[in-house]
Image (cartoon, rainbow, N blue to C red):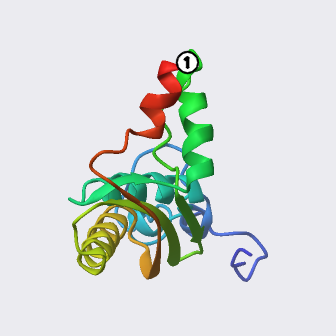
């Protein structure tokens, strides 16, 4: 809405103030967008992204032999043998991602002789630190299921399936 003078005409100075600047130049008092550029828009993080971060962080812990249940490891070993099939870093990891929080379920196989409670604690600490640092999400819980213990004299299921 423009201001009108007594004669009914619009003042030119008022039009200059209200008309949008299409020149691309920023003059004094010209505002672009609104506020800090970092707050413009929304960032969403897929479940798979959090699962990859958590899977890599869990595998870095000493005492974690592998991730996933026996069945998922068997399918993973078959998938790894297929040309072009990559090793799945998300095997044994399930994430539920909200707007600001995430919860994780991990299934691990530990090496024989390690303290399972110490390994689980170290996995939680490593996963929480990595996910929160990289995504900014708050990790509300990390549930860990130990599905197996790798004995020193057992062969890996993956190496057995490659020999067949």
**Res 63 → quadrant:** bottom left
Q: Residues within 10 Å of mark 1 (few under 14, many from 20)?
A: few
- Residue at the image position 20 percent from the left and 59 percent from the top: 62
Q: From this view, report whether residue 130 is shown above or below residue 137.
A: above
The answer to whether residue 86 of the structure is visible from this angle is no
- Residue at the image position 74 percent from the left and 75 percent from the top: 1
- Residue reaching furthest to the front: 153
How far from the left and from the top, in percent, is residue 10? 70, 69
Q: From this view, report whether residue 46 is shown above or below residue 17.
A: above
Q: From this view, report whether residue 158 is shown above or below residue 60.
A: above
- The reply, left or right, for residue 32 in relation to residue 116 is right
Residue 26 or residue 142, whichever sits in front? 142
**Res 149 → quadrant:** bottom left
- Residue at the image position 57 percent from the left and 63 percent from the top: 94
> Can you identify the residue that label 1 sits on?
84
How far from the left and from the top, in percent, is residue 35? 42, 72
**Res 89 → quadrant:** top left
Residue 24 or residue 12, whichever sits in front? 24
Residue 2 or residue 80, whichever sits in front? 80
- Residue at the image position 27 percent from the left and 49 percent from the top: 152
- Residue reaching furthest to the top: 83
State the count of labels: 1
The answer to whether residue 123 of the structure is visible from this angle is yes
Q: Helix, strand or loop at disc 1?
A: loop
How far from the left and from the top, in percent, is residue 12? 60, 63
Q: Quadrant of the C terminus?
A: top right
- The reply, left or right, for residue 92 in relation to residue 55 is right
């Amino acid at each position: 809405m423009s201001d009108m003078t007594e004669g009914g005409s619009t003042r030119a100075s008022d039009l200059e103030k209200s008309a949008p600047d299409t020149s691309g130049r920023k003059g004094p008092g010209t505002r672009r967008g609104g506020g800090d550029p970092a707050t413009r828009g929304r960032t969403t993080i897929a479940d798979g992204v959090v699962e990859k971060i958590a899977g890599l962080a869990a595998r870095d812990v000493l005492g974690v032999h592998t991730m996933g249940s026996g069945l998922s490891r068997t399918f993973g070993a078959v998938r790894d043998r297929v040309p072009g099939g990559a090793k799945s870093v998300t095997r044994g990891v399930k994430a539920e991602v909200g707007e600001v929080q995430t919860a994780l379920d991990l299934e691990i196989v530990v090496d024989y002789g390690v303290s399972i409670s110490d390994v689980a604690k170290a996995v939680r600490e490593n996963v929480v630190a990595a996910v929160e640092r990289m995504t900014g999400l708050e990790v509300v819980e990390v549930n860990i299921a130990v599905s197996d213990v790798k004995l020193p004299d057992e062969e890996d299921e993956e190496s057995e399936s490659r020999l067949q």
